[in-house]
Image: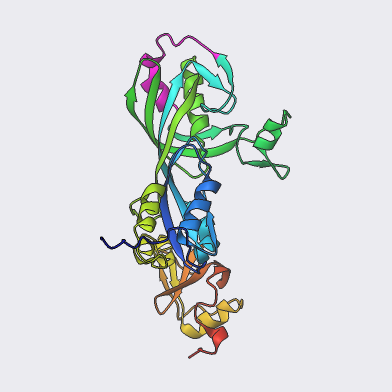
């Protein structure tokens, strides 16, 4: 008689835990960013999680999922310029600018493709965009997509963005695929639609993939399937070592920002919310005392938060939770 093999009980779950870091998810098409976040958080058994820079269900690619204290800094992780790959289908215009919307116009393509390179060049540099009505931009405190779903008309505010380059990667008889490197806030659906309008036949997005964000470490993206397989392969369901190794530490993710290193005693006071106006003993990297944008703040090499300098005074904007353990009586 053979001995029965003990099969780990996959139905059991580890307790929720405090884990900090950024997971570079390769979001699949067909699910919302919110659902993708929920799945990642559940696999890591994280108490807290958040994401930034939502991708539409149609879109795939880079979605940074911020676990634990990283969620505090999520708004800073997608401040950089971004790269996308997108496919536009010519001859059809939809109300959402992508394949999930309702068709509102159809046109003959004609010789539009012969003018494609010339049309693309017109959208490089500083341009003005009117975001799609199906977007999360708020007007009077309400996202535009809510007005659209309710059938209400609203004036959509335009915005200035920068398209650093557009590379034509491929064409078919009725579509084109481009790589776009653009500033934060650029809508690729609008860009493809505007290119279609320039060609005289209209276009909408059938494929959209975010491949890179300036500032984030150039780490490997991981799929939900690969993360789940790693979790399922564990003999000990409380062992997260291999999964946690996939996370980018917060200090590494924030290291793209200009940096100010402050003395430890000053750091203690800053963590308690007290502004610091004597910065003579501080070390500045890629900034100076007159710098007006966000800086990362460190002490003894340790990342403790972000802030800004105003009239020579360092002010904290977002800090790690008790990074120096001063609330536990461990102040040196």
The part of the image, by quadrant, that contains residue 284 is bottom left
Q: Is residue 103 left or right of residue 168?
A: right
Residue interval drawn in magenta: 106-122
Which of these two is toward me, 95 or 256?
95
Q: Is residue 157 left or right of residue 185?
A: right
Taking the spot 40% from the left edge, 63% from the top edge, the residue there is: 255
Please say if 170 is above or below 135: above
Q: Is residue 236 left or right of residue 74?
A: left
Please say if 21 is above or below 267: above
Asked if residue 110 is among those painted magenta in the image, a careful observer would answer: yes
Taking the spot 57% from the left edge, 82% from the top edge, the residue there is: 269
Q: Quadrant of the N terminus?
A: bottom left
Which of these two is toward me, 197 or 29?
29
| Scheme of image coloration | rainbow
Asked if residue 30 is among those painted magenta in the image, a careful observer would answer: no
Q: How many marks?
A: 0
> Whole-percent x and y of residue 277?
57, 77
> Whole-percent x and y of residue 43?
46, 57
**Is any atom of residue 280 visible in this view?**
yes
**Is any atom of residue 155 visible in this view?**
no
> Whole-percent x and y of residue 293?
52, 60
> Whole-percent x and y of residue 8?
38, 61
Which of these two is toward me, 96 or 284?
96
Check the image and name the residue furthest to the front. 1
Taking the spot 47% from the left edge, 58% from the top edge, the residue there is: 11
Which of these two is toward me, 264 or 41?
41
Please say if 245 is above or below 110: below
């Amino acid at each position: 008689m053979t001995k029965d093999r003990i099969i780990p009980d996959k139905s059991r779950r580890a307790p929720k835990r405090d884990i900090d870091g950024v997971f570079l998810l390769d979001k699949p098409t067909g699910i919302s960013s919110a659902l993708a976040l929920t799945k990642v958080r559940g696999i890591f058994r994280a108490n807290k999680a958040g994401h930034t820079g939502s991708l539409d269900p149609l879109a795939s690619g880079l979605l940074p999922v911020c676990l634990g204290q990283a969620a505090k800094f999520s708004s800073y992780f997608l401040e950089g310029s971004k790269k996308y790959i997108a496919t536009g289908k010519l001859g059809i215009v939809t109300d959402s600018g992508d394949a999930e919307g309702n068709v509102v116009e159809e046109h003959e393509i004609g010789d539009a493709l012969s003018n494609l390179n010339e049309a693309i060049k017109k959208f490089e540099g500083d341009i003005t965009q009117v975001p799609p009505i199906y977007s999360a931009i708020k007007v009077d405190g309400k996202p535009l997509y809510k007005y659209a779903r309710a059938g209400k008309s609203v004036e959509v505010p335009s915005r200035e963005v920068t398209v650093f380059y557009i590379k034509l990667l491929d064409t078919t008889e009725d579509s084109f695929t481009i790589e776009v490197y653009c500033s934060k806030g650029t809508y690729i659906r609008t860009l493809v639609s505007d290119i279609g309008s320039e060609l005289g036949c209209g276009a909408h997005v059938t494929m959209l993939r975010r491949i890179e964000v300036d500032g984030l470490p150039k780490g490997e993206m991981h799929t939900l399937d690969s993360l789940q397989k790693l979790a399922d392969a564990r003999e000990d369901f409380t062992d997260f070592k291999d999964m946690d190794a996939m996370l980018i530490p917060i200090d590494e993710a924030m290291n793209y920002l200009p940096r100010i290193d402050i003395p430890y005693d000053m750091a203690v006071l800053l963590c308690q919310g007290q502004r610091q106006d004597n910065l003579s003993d501080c070390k500045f990297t890629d900034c100076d005392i007159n710098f007006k944008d966000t800086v990362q703040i460190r002490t003894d090499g340790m990342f403790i938060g972000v802030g800004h300098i105003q009239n020579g005074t360092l002010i904290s904007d977002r800090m790690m939770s008790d990074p120096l353990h001063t609330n536990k009586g461990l102040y040196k």
